[in-house]
């Protein structure tokens, strides 16, 4: 009982009008989020704790950082993500980003990537229930993601993970691949970005986009973007010395091409882009067995298409 009372008092200190008291309290909370036991204790007071931490994001630089670190640690728990989503955390994060209320853009994006592992949070970010603004958040974030590609430090690199989360949903894939939105092109340009996180997240999002493209009704949108398909092939196969060095990324890209070749339209478009020749050159220097296996299946797909025609 004493421990519960101490936590309640600590949360009340988070609401203090005195900045020094707030900072001391949020530092204690951040420390507690560093252990499993501490997280368990804090979750018992989530109804009052989470709103207090969310308000402190707009505090001074150090207070904001400690509040965000606390929320990031807490959001590794499924029950915490559910509670934060109920508190409209996605809307709050977007407000902080667009209004410049926190200096820690990188931490806001990290928190957003943590919470969008849940479907309800993805739906909030996509704004699917508000037709007049559906996709507006994504348009804002996608532009900032592309514009900050070469920045060091990289404030928007976690957007690649957010796009991976969003493209796990059919509604997310369909919205992101709408004509004119530029998502597929944006993902392809990140394959040569300085950030490894951008590269891997974008490759996984590309694979998600290709996974059910025919069923989703987005296949034509993908295949019409031939420059992005060329960039994917170049990163996979090492054409023009741009071969992607990460095995994880090449696996995702190979599987993306494999999924497209399995469709009649995809096979034809990739054939016209000279994909078989590019893949043959890439296969000669490929060492990862998983990538090699995928390339072999792609080759068999092209052969089957040739025999059928």
Image: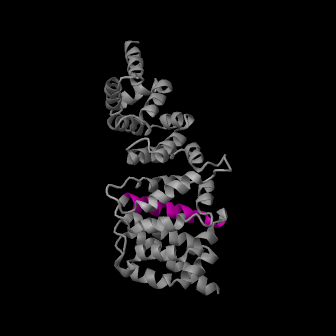
Q: Quadrant of the N terminus?
A: top left
The picture places residue 269, in percent across and down from the top left corner, at 58, 80
Q: How is the image coloured?
A: one colour
User: Up-down: is 200 above or below 22?
Assistant: below
Residue 295: in sight, yes or no? no
- Residue nearer the viewer, 187 or 208: 187
Determine the image quadrant of residue 49. Answer: top left
Residue drawn at point x = 55 percent, y = 37 percent: 88
- Residue nearer the viewer, 42 or 308: 42
The picture places residue 271, in percent across and down from the top left corner, at 55, 83
Determine the image quadrant of residue 224. Answer: bottom right
The picture places residue 304, in percent across and down from the top left corner, at 58, 81
Q: Quadrant of the C terminus?
A: bottom right
User: Does the segment drawn in magenta span residue 307?
Assistant: no
Determine the image quadrant of residue 179. Answer: bottom right
Numbered circles on residues, count: 0
User: Up-down: is 227 above or below 7?
Assistant: below
User: Up-down: is 18 above or below 70?
Assistant: above
Residue lying farthest top?
Answer: 2
Residue drawn at point x = 42 percent, y = 73 percent: 236
Residue drawn at point x = 45 percent, y = 63 percent: 203
Give the prevailing secondary structure in the magenta stretch: helix
Left or right of 194, for residue 275:
right
User: Does the segment drawn in magenta span residue 203?
Assistant: yes
User: Up-down: is 238 above or below 72?
Assistant: below
The picture places residue 285, in percent across and down from the top left corner, at 34, 78
Residue drawn at point x = 42 percent, y = 18 percent: 8
Residue 102: in sight, yes or no? yes
- Which residues are the magenta region? 197-214
């Amino acid at each position: 009982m004493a421990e519960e009372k101490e936590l309640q008092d600590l949360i009340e200190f988070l609401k203090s009008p005195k900045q020094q008291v707030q900072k001391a309290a949020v530092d204690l909370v951040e420390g507690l989020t560093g252990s499993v036991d501490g997280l368990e204790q804090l979750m018992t007071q989530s109804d009052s704790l989470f709103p207090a931490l969310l308000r402190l994001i707009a505090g001074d630089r150090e207070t904001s950082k400690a509040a965000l670190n606390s929320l990031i640690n807490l959001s590794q728990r499924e029950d915490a993500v559910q509670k934060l989503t109920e508190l409209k955390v996605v809307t709050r994060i977007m407000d902080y980003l667009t209004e410049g209320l926190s200096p820690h853009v990188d931490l806001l994006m990290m928190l957003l990537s943590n919470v969008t592992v849940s479907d309800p949070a993805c739906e909030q970010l996509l704004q699917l229930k508000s037709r007049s603004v559906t996709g507006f958040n994504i348009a804002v974030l996608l532009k900032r993601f592309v514009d900050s590609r070469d920045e060091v430090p990289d404030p928007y690199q976690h957007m690649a993970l957010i796009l991976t989360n969003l493209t796990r949903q059919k509604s997310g894939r369909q919205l992101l691949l709408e004509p004119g939105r530029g998502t597929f092109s944006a993902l392809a340009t990140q394959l040569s970005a300085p950030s490894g996180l951008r590269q891997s997240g974008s490759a996984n999002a590309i694979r998600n986009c290709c996974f059910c493209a025919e069923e989703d009704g987005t296949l034509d949108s993908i295949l019409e973007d031939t420059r992005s398909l060329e960039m994917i092939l170049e990163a996979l196969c090492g054409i023009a010395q741009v071969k992607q060095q990460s095995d994880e990324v090449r696996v995702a890209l190979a599987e993306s091409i494999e999924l497209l070749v399995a469709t009649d339209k995809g096979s034809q478009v990739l054939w016209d882009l000279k994909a078989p020749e590019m893949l043959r050159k890439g296969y000669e220097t490929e060492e990862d067995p998983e990538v090699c296996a995928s390339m072999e299946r792609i080759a068999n797909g092209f052969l089957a298409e040739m025999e059928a025609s």
